[in-house]
Amino acid sequence: MRTNAISNPFMVLHFNYSWEGIKTQLQEIIDRFPNRYKLSYRNDDDETIILVASLDFRVFGEDITTIISLSKINACNNFSMLACEAKSASGDISSPDAYERATFFIESLNDDMMMVY
């Protein structure tokens, strides 16, 4: 069965602190919301973080998890612009429900990051 990609939600997030501050903030969010976010990957050389997001990790499945990729896209030391893209666990977004879920998690992550700092 072939599915067509609809679109992967994408947002650029702006923060007035360094990559170290971003990492600290994301770790606090992961600690505060362990049922919503899990750290999947972090590369400090590339300044990239990948999170797995779900409303309930006890019911883990490809259809209900979202992968959020965060990459720093500027060279400033004390200011960070992050490219934030969400995909389903099985790849590109291919249904309206998956698109809505992925958009929800990007917006929730942005709200959570604003709340922490």
Image (cartoon, helix red, strand yellow):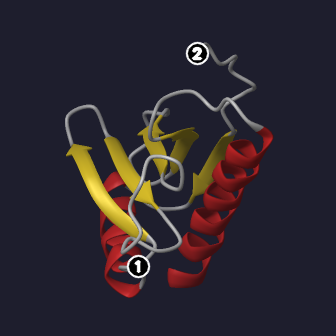
Residue 112 vertical placement versus 14 (above, below): below
Q: Residues within 10 Å of mark 2 (few under 14, many from 20)?
A: few
Residues under labels 1 and 2: Cα distance? 32 Å
Of residues 28 and 63, the one nearer the viewer is: 63
Residue 112 vertical placement versus 79 (above, below): below
Residue found 56% across the figure and 42% down from its top: 84
Name the spot of residue 105 as percent of width and height, x first. 61, 60
Which of the two marks, 1 or 2, is nearer to us in this view?
2
Q: Residues within 10 Å of mark 1 (few under 14, many from 20)?
A: some
* Number of on-image labels: 2
Mark 1–mark 2 CB contact (< 8 Å): no
Q: Residue furthest bottom?
A: 32
Name the spot of residue 41 as percent of width and height, x first. 24, 46
Amino acid type, callout 2:
Met
Residue found 41% across the figure and 76% down from its top: 29
Task: Please give the residue where the numbered disc 2 appears in the rendered image.
Answer: 1
Amino acid type, callout 1:
Asn
Residue 65 vertical placement versus 81 (above, below): below
Task: Please give the residue where the numbered disc 1 appears in the rendered image.
Answer: 35
Residue found 36% across the figure and 46% down from its top: 50
Of residues 58 and 81, the one nearer the viewer is: 58
On the rendered structure, is 54 left or right of 6?
left
Of residues 93 and 3, the one nearer the viewer is: 3
Q: Residue furthest front?
A: 1
Of residues 52 and 90, the one nearer the viewer is: 90
Label of residue 71 in the image? none
Q: Secondary structure at mark 1?
A: loop
